[in-house]
Image: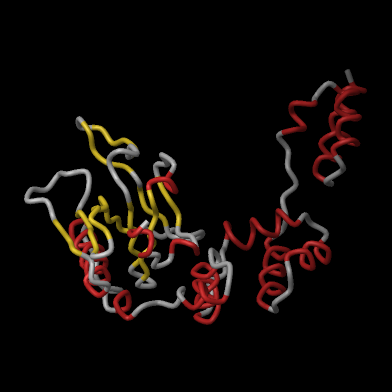
Amino acid sequence: MRAWYSDCAVAFQAAEQGLTPCARSEIGHRTGIIVIMSTVRKRHSKELRARAFEMRAAKQSLDEIARELSVSRSTVHYWLTVINPIPLTAAELKRKRQARDVRYSENAAAKRLADESKFHKATVDLKLSRAQKCRIAEAAVLFRLALRGYRILQPVFDGDKVDWLIGSDDSADYKRVQVKWMRRGDYGRPFCGATCMSENKRRRYRADEIDVLVGYDLYTDTAYVFTAAELRSRAAVSATNDAVERWDKLRG
């Protein structure tokens, strides 16, 4: 029994000293306290964490901090982002927003479209309701259609699967057009839903219900035009370069 207590003391001492998992497993197998040992974790001093904050403030990378302090990179990341996150400067926040806004862009022309529009700047301090967003998106798309000379027919009552029927002098056919507000997350491209309400349930559009879906992004004041074939029965669609202001798709 005395030997077992001695082995226990060795095991706990090994855990406190931060031995490798293999070394601790070997001791635990001999002493029979593997479960107890697995709950013991090495605690880093506050001075070590403070040193990590100082090094990060000096623009050192996580790998450099981890090597100098002899800790893992994940531990450094946890200290700097969870325990006591370092606030970003105004310049860093601006670079982060710009990187987010152009991350989806694939060429220089698309990057220029990622600039914040004057219309979005005017609404920064406003909390737009869902109804306001719908009206803004429809007004923006309606303005573009009027500039291009399209004929616009609107249903008398709300609740239809499409917002307008769009025609032109080049064709006797009318396209069924639905307008959506494009949302933005912290990362990735703007996107909008491609669903409608039917029998109190939300479902995807069918091919015989819609010809064109137009998503409007207020941040860049850009309209993205998608045909029913491009939707492919998806529940949502993201902004793409080949959909930017593609009003020629209404004539196809």
Residue 248, image x, y percentages: 38, 64
Most extreme residue toward the left is 156
Determine the residue positioned at 44% across, 58% down. 185
Determine the residue positioned at 62% across, 63% down. 80
Determine the residue positioned at 83% across, 63% down. 67
Determine the residue positioned at 43% across, 60% down. 190
The type of colouring in the image is: secondary structure
> Residue 96 vs residue 25: left or right?
left
Residue 153, image x, y percentages: 14, 57
Most extreme residue toward the top is 1
Observer-nearest residue: 142 or 93? 142
> Residue 244 vs residue 41: left or right?
left
Q: Quadrant of residue 209?
A: top left
Observer-nearest residue: 95 or 211? 211
Residue 246, image x, y percentages: 40, 65
In the displayed structure, 171 sits above or below 10; it is below
> Residue 102 vs residue 67: left or right?
left
* Quadrant, the C terminus: bottom left
Observer-nearest residue: 15 or 234? 234
* Quadrant, the N terminus: top right
In the displayed structure, 123 sits above or below 196; it is below
Residue 108, image x, y percentages: 56, 76
Q: Quadrant of residue 134?
A: bottom left
